[in-house]
Amino acid sequence: METIKLNIDLSLNQLIEAIKQLSPKDRLKINDVIWNDNIEIPVEHQKIVLDRMAKSKANPKRLLDWDEVSKNL
């Protein structure tokens, strides 16, 4: 297994530049590690999404077609 040991201070931009130097395979590994963490979604955010879903089910006419909307962006 390939290992890298770092003990340096980096700004976010420096870290991004370092990651850009990795192979695509290693960059994908980093992406997987970042996004596979179990991120807790705050209850307040869950309530907002559930409320919006309920409103769209109750009144589907309020929804906009993405293809139409994206033409105007």
Image (tube, grey):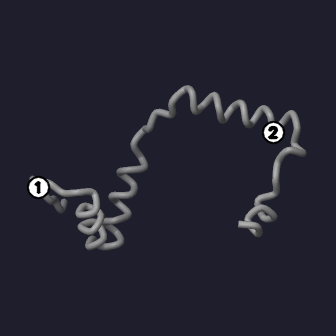
Contact, mark 2 vs mark 1 (Cβ under 8 Å) = no
Helix, strand or loop at mark 1:
loop
Q: Name the residue that disc number 1 marks.
A: 8
Figure check: 66 above or below 40: below
Q: Nearer the viewer, residue 12 or 5?
A: 12
- Determine which quarter of the picture holds residue 13: bottom left
Which mark is drawn over residue 63? none
Figure check: 40 above or below 71: above
Residue at image position (81%, 39%) is 56
Q: Nearer the viewer, residue 23 or 13?
A: 13
Q: How many marks?
A: 2
Residue at image position (26%, 73%) is 21
Give left or right: position of 39 versus 54: left
Q: Amino acid at mark 2?
A: Ser
Q: Position of residue 52 (x, y in %)?
A: 73, 36
Q: Amino acid at mark 1?
A: Ile
**Separation of marks 2 and 1 at Cα, in angstroms:** 50 Å
| Quadrant for the N terminus in the image | bottom left
Q: Position of residue 26 (x, y in %)?
A: 31, 66
Residue at image position (42%, 49%) is 35
Farthest front residue? 72
Q: Position of residue 34 (x, y in %)?
A: 37, 50
Which mark is drawn over residue 56? 2
Is disc 2 surrounded by few (<14), some (14 to 19) or many (20+) residues within 10 Å? few
Give left or right: position of 6 versus 28: left
Is disc 1 surrounded by few (<14), some (14 to 19) or many (20+) residues within 10 Å? few
Tell which circle, 2 or 1, labels the residue nearer the N-terminal end. 1
Q: Position of residue 12 (x, y in %)?
A: 27, 57
Residue at image position (23%, 63%) is 14
